[in-house]
Structure formats: structure tokens, C-alpha cells
Amino acid sequence: MTLQELEQAIDKHDLGAFRDEILRVAKPCYSFITKRATSPVSVDQSKVGGRPDLPIGCEWPRNSQGEPLLFLARLVGDDLASFAPQLASHHLSFFGEWEHEMMGRILCVPSTASTVQLDPPVGPSDWIPPLPRLALRASFALGSSDSKISNH
């Protein structure tokens, strides 16, 4: 959502009386947009789930009990460049879990690194979710829990 789209939504939903406060608490952010892949997602494309492409010799990230974390997503340099130019030549791989503890790991890998697509080290392969393509879009979030919008 662009700032213009946010202002249009304010008008559409008759929130003009709150316009200034909504715009004050609106924070720029990025939204994830997924689209089901109709062909294999290549190593130079962002994706959700599937198998990670990790540097050769890199071990699968694990939680504090030594259990493997779930591969969540990969963001590639082309998608990162618009909001984090310093990461334009890297890929970020996100791993996490919430069963035993809320935790995660982010691996930052140079996009030129030699990688290999890994299967999870334990467990059935059917725990790997489908492979949608992932893109980022500039958007706005309406503040956090400490933001206050008063009723005039």
C-alpha cells in the first residue's frame, strides 16, 4: 500500500476525522506477497518454504535442544536491495520454530557462494511446505501496541 492508497482508504472508509492521527502512526514497512510457483524456484529467487540452498559445508540450523529448525523463507539480493542496499549481493535464509521455544536464525549468505539444496536432517520430508514465490512490496503498518489513536 502506498501513502496515496492509504489516504484513499481513509476516505473510502469515512475516517477523515482520524486522518492526521492515522498518518502519524502509519510506519513504512514491507509486505510479503506470495504466488504459487508453477515451476521450480531457482536459487536467485525469493521463496517461502521448500528446501534451503545453503553454502557447501554449512550445517542445518538447530534450536537449543539440538533439533533442526524449520526452513521458513529465503530473500534474495534483488528483493532486498530496495530497502537494504548493503544486502544486495546476499541472500537471507530464515529458520525458526515455535514448538519448544520461540526462536529463529537468519543466515546471511553471499549470492556468489557455492550452495547445495539440503533436505531436513531428520523427520519426514512432508513437513516441508509448498514452494510459493515470494516478493516484497512497500507498504504501511499502523503503529504498534504503544500507539494511541484517540476518539475526538
Image (cartoon, rainbow, N blue to C red):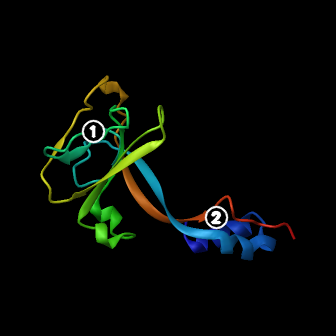
Residue 129 quadrant: top left
Q: Against 114, is 10 above or below?
A: below
The residue to which callout 2 is attached is: 143
Instruction: Tell me the quadrant of the picture where the C terminus can be found.
Output: bottom right
Residue lying at 40% horizontally and 47% vertically, measured from the top left: 35
- Residue lying at the far top of the rendered structure: 124
Residue 69 in picture, x, y percent from top left: 35, 37
Numbered disc total:
2
Residue 99 versus residue 149: which sits nearer the camera? Answer: 99
Q: Secondary structure at mark 2?
A: loop
Residue 83 in picture, x, y percent from top left: 40, 70
Residue 136 versus residue 9: which sits nearer the camera? Answer: 136
Please state if 76 lies on the left or on the right of 21 as rendered.
left
Q: Nearer the viewer, mark 1 or mark 2?
A: 2
Please state if 75 lies on the left or on the right of 9 as rendered.
left
**Crowding near the residue tagged with mark 2, few <14, some 14–19, many ≥20 C-alpha atoms within 10 Å:** some
Please state if 52 lies on the left or on the right of 149 as rendered.
left
Residue lying at 40% horizontally and 42% vertically, measured from the top left: 96
Residue 147 in picture, x, y percent from top left: 70, 65
Disc on the earlier residue, 1 or 2: 1
